[in-house]
Image: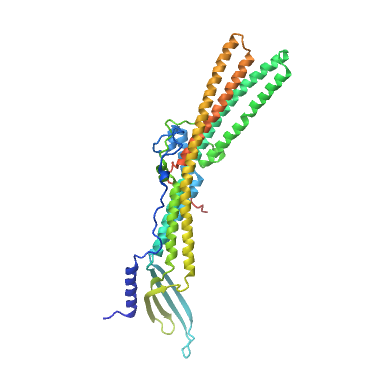
Amino acid sequence: MKPRPPARLAVFAFAVALALGGCVVGPRYAPPITPTTAKTPFVSAQSANAVDAPLPPRWWRLYNDPILDRLVEQALVENEDLKVAAANLAYAQGLLEEARAGRFPTTSLTGGVAYGVSAQPGAVNAPTLGYSATFAASYDFDLFGRIRRAIQSAKANAESVLAAEDAVRVTVAAETAGAYANICGYARQIAVARASLTLVQETYDITLTERNAGALSDFDLAREAVLLEQAKAAIPPLEGQRRSALFTLAALIGKTPAEVPADAATCQAPPTLIKPLPVGDGAALLRRRPDLRQAERALAAATARIGVAAADLYPTVTLGGSVNPTGTLSGPGAGASLLSYSIGPLITWTFPNILVARAHVKEASAQASAALATFDGAVLTALEETEQALATYAAELDHHVALAAARERANEAVRLEKVQSQAGVASFLDLLQVQATAVAADQALAASDQAVSADQVAVFQALGGGWEDAPAVVPPPIPKR
């Protein structure tokens, strides 16, 4: 027995789908190539006393500071920016699920009950109560890969958003460590500034006594008064900066300013590395930095969207079917029912007016080109930021060495001045002035200690570590009444 016409159409559509099911239009994605020179050791690593060792995932543990470890790990769970990134990832994953749903048939079910009078000529106009229902289903054969390209694009986009979340982790870890280092560094500078104030106050008191005795002039007293006020004025800005750093730390770990961690407020000296700074090389940097992964996945998504747009240049074949039961519940012909059904392919094509589809292909191609340029720029930016951070750190190390030498010389001058003062060769006022110089050297060295810690954190942030072993972040739930 020959198949009926509807069956022939269904068989024909199925055969076409099998023949063309593997046809996917649009360019095939290939990962971009990075410059060979980008994978070499860093130019500034040697001057920064860095070692070519892998960067550990939890780099902050290199400071061997339990308070710092706890703060960073708390920030990686409670930070609000991370919760926003987690919500963005959930949204991108929802878009991926939506794209994957295109692989399955779509169905609809409608039904209703109607009461009325027939208006047909010659018929008995008795009221009737009837019902009708429709079940419809359709399936897109995706002959030219529009759905497959859409899934590829959504998947790459979700992976790009995941990389963006990792990039936020890098920033949060570095900013938390930097805020803690600033808190400790300002505490150290405040202690040195107060020691300086004590010495200047002693010098002023001695100058006042000798001025009253006629040994010194009013000019000498006024000069010391200026130094005294300057020493007093140096402390409030440092205290304000320290409080500001405490509030920054509280926000980073998801707390209010009233909930500043008490143990962080007790820190008195910047954390120091227990091992040489590990930086690896350019190849490891390109594999690790989340922003590069984000840019590469964005390029993959943009490339797949070209295929989505190109599929509109070709016809769309959809297999559809429906079942329509109808019947009468009361009135003339009560109990009568009718069942009808239909099945067959539906071809949709905008030919010959495909100008809009071609424009969409052009737009998608331009976006992919921009994504490629963005990736290339991200590679250069990653190398630039790392080299700049290493160069700045190396310069501060040299600065720190010179300041440490200056402090040693100042301390030696204090020792010699004490010997001369005990021998009656130098006055006590001269000794206090030399001590003030030594304290000034301590202040400069304390500021450099803080700068060294900040520059180290900047290097770690440029290297892009800290996201690998980070815990998952859960977006906040929607509040309900």
Q: Is residue 322 above or below residue 463?
A: below
Is 3 on the left-hand or right-hand side of 427?
Answer: left
**Which residue is nearer to you in this view: 349 or 192?**
349
x, y percent for residue 202: 64, 18
Q: Quadrant of the N terminus?
A: bottom left
- Residue 263 in sight in this render: no
**Which residue is nearer to you in this view: 310 or 148?**
310
Identify which residue is drawn at 37% across, 79% down. 339
**Which residue is nearer to you in this view: 287 or 332?**
287
- Residue 380 in sight in this render: yes
Identify which residue is drawn at 52% across, 41% down. 252
Count of labels in the image: 0
Q: Is residue 424 above or below residue 398?
A: above
Residue 420 lies in what quarter of the image? top right
Identify which residue is drawn at 61% across, 29% down. 235
x, y percent for residue 433: 62, 19
Q: Is residue 371 above or below residue 211?
A: below
x, y percent for residue 424: 61, 9
Q: Is residue 224 above or below residue 307?
A: above
